[in-house]
Image (tube, rainbow, N blue to C red):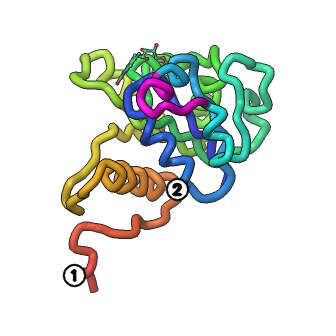
């Protein structure tokens, strides 16, 4: 499985960093211009630090990238975290950066698209944009960690949510689920 992972300039870069570690298969990474700033601010990391956790890093600016073409296969795009601005671009059908272009490709080629929206509160504009993308088949998955597994650390909280993203992308069940042991 080949997945394009996009890290934007929304808060929560740590989720994207952990996704690279946990996602099975081939992972191709794009970090937006503001994604780089927030990544550094929140995790102290640069894109170079993430190279070891992915199979290739692509510039967001170079639209001559092989990722810009729908004829090149990939199975899924995950944007984590996704800014409200990024969501607006995708909802408007804009593809003027490599990251927005791969999202457009995912929608038009009916490949999996997951947007881990991270913004609060949400404007009506963002809600309408989310609905628009969802109607096109995109999965809008707000960065919304859960607490029923009683995370005792930030790492655990982030990891549990990222496992849930992996489940949505790949269909692989999360390692632990709410009262899973009670299932037959
Ligand atoms: C420290 C920092 C945190 C930010 N957090 C958010 C956020 O949580 N959600 C959001 O939608 N935008 C956030 N922004 C604003 C985005 O970075 C900005 O809208 C940017 O244009 C997004 O561009 P991109 O989606 O291409 O990365 C933040 C900016 C900074 C500098």
Which residue carries the number 1 mark? 182
Q: Position of residue 70 (x, y in %)?
A: 73, 34
Q: Is residue 119 magenta?
A: no
Q: Which span of residues is magenta-colored?
A: 38-46
Which residue carries the number 2 mark? 22
> Real-space Cα distance between discs 2 and 1?
26 Å
Q: Earlier in the sequence, mark 2 or mark 1?
A: 2
Residue 116 vertical position relative to residue 175 in the rendered view, above or below: above
Residue in the picture at 31% in, 15% down: 125
Majority secondary structure of magenta residues = helix
Closer to the camera in the image, 13 or 6: 13
Does label 2 point to a residue whose CB lies under 8 Å from ligand 1?
A: no
In screen coordinates, is 184 left or right of 100?
left
Q: Is residue 120 among what the camera can see?
A: yes
Residue in the picture at 66% in, 22% down: 60
The quadrant in which the N terminus is found is bottom right
């Amino acid at each position: 499985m080949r997945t394009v992972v996009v890290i934007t300039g929304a808060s929560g870069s740590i989720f994207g960093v952990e996704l690279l570690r946990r996602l099975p298969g081939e992972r191709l990474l794009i970090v937006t211009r503001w994604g780089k700033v927030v990544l550094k601010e929140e995790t102290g990391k640069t894109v170079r630090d993430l190279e070891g956790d992915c199979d290739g890093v692509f510039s967001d600016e170079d639209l001559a990238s092989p990722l810009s073409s729908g004829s090149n296969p990939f199975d899924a795009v995950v944007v984590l975290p996704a800014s409200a601005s990024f969501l607006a671009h995708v909802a408007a059908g804009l593809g003027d950066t490599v990251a927005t272009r791969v999202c457009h490709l995912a929608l038009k080629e009916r490949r999996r698209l997951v947007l881990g929206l991270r913004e609060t509160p949400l404007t009506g504009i963002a809600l309408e944009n989310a609905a628009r993308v969802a109607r096109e088949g995109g999965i809008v998955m707000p960065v919304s960690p859960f607490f029923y597994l009683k995370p005792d650390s930030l790492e655990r909280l982030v990891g549990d949510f990222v496992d849930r993203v992996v489940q949505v992308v790949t269909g692989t069940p999360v390692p632990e689920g709410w009262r899973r042991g009670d299932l037959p």
